[in-house]
Image (cartoon, grey):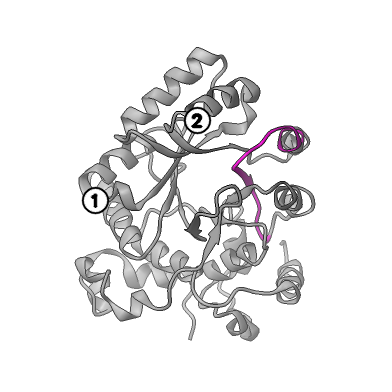
Amino acid sequence: MPLTRREMLRVTAGAGALTALGLRPRELATSAPLRGSPLLERAIPSSGEKIPVVGIGTARRYDVAAPAELDALREVLAAFGRLGGKLVDTAPSYGRAEVVVGELVREIGNRESLFLATKVRTEGRQAGIDQMEESFRRLHTERIDLMQVHNLVDVERQLSTLREWKAAGRVRYLGVTTSFHRQFEAFEAVMRAEELDFIQVNYSLGDRVAGERILPLAADRGMAVLVNLPYARGRLFQAVGDRPLPAWAVEFDCESWGQFFLKFILGHPAVTCVIPGTAKMGYLLDNVGAARRRLPDAEQRRRMVDFFESLPGA
């Protein structure tokens, strides 16, 4: 029987939970149950480089300082790489998250296997340079894989600097982000006017506005798409409650509600990678499971929408 997300977390919380799965923390890399089939990958249109379709978002959940919380995040980031994951997205505006990611990745020693993405969000050329230089220091890296102009703040000026840094090899890719519907019109204008490697936007089964124009435009413009807020800030889990998965979810190898929501997003061909917030081992295993085996096709995605819209209060 498929596990709910709450059950998945309970089963896999902490070292004792991994033992319940027949695993110890350091055996994640070789465990057949966790290894399963390879993670699905999609190409970044501007380069052809492929990345796994599920990453990690760090807003709020990585803004921590307590030793126990840091230990949990260290295990997640270490296991993420061993399970084949790559993209970790953070930002200076996420409190301590950027510092925490940098310190833990340095401790683990897996920087070269990860795709690190962060952001710049400030006014003015020199202020942007100063903030990005600080991100390099916090992340303990000489090259950042993806630097994004966060929520379009001073977007033209910051993109100008990023083009110089990309040419110099300091950043590999550049992009822009939003998580607000009110910015969508301006966001589209930037997408049409600028040559971007990536965009990042809010999109989910319960918030499909970006699917109407933003995602098709990204496909037309050859831009990779990162998706934030894939659970609509928890609203999707609240909507389904303790209901069982519909029986037809097995048609696209779905084992939990978390995977149901992520696979809906990944079923859109324009989406390159979804970045759910991931701070606990149970959530990591569940999320990575969405990157395995089949994804829903267009008809199955319509059925998922119809199902969700039929829920009371959805």
Does residue 8 appear left or right of residue 239 in this picture? left
Q: Quadrant of the C terminus?
A: bottom right
Measured from the top left, where is residue 103 in percent x and y?
Answer: 26, 39
Residue type, mark 1 in image: Asp
Task: Say which mark, if any, is on residue 71.
Answer: 1
Task: Say which mark, if any, is on residue 167.
Answer: 2
Residue segment shown in magenta:
189-205
The residue that appears at 52% across and 25% down in the rendered structure is: 164
The residue that appears at 63% across and 62% down in the rendered structure is: 265
Question: Badge 2, how many Cα within 10 Å: few under 14, some, many 20+?
Answer: few
The answer to whether residue 85 is magenta is: no
Measured from the top left, where is residue 237 in percent x and y?
Answer: 57, 63
Along the viewing direction, whichever of 88 and 170 lies nearer the viewer: 170
Does residue 169 appear left or right of residue 42 in this picture? left
Residue type, mark 2 in image: Ala
Along the viewing direction, whichever of 119 and 141 lies nearer the viewer: 141
Measured from the top left, where is residue 248 in percent x and y?
Answer: 65, 84
Task: Say which mark, if any, is on residue 200.
Answer: none
The answer to whether residue 195 is magenta is: yes
Of the residues tagged 1 and 2, which is closer to the observer? 2
Local SS, label 1:
helix
Along the viewing direction, whichever of 84 and 284 lies nearer the viewer: 84
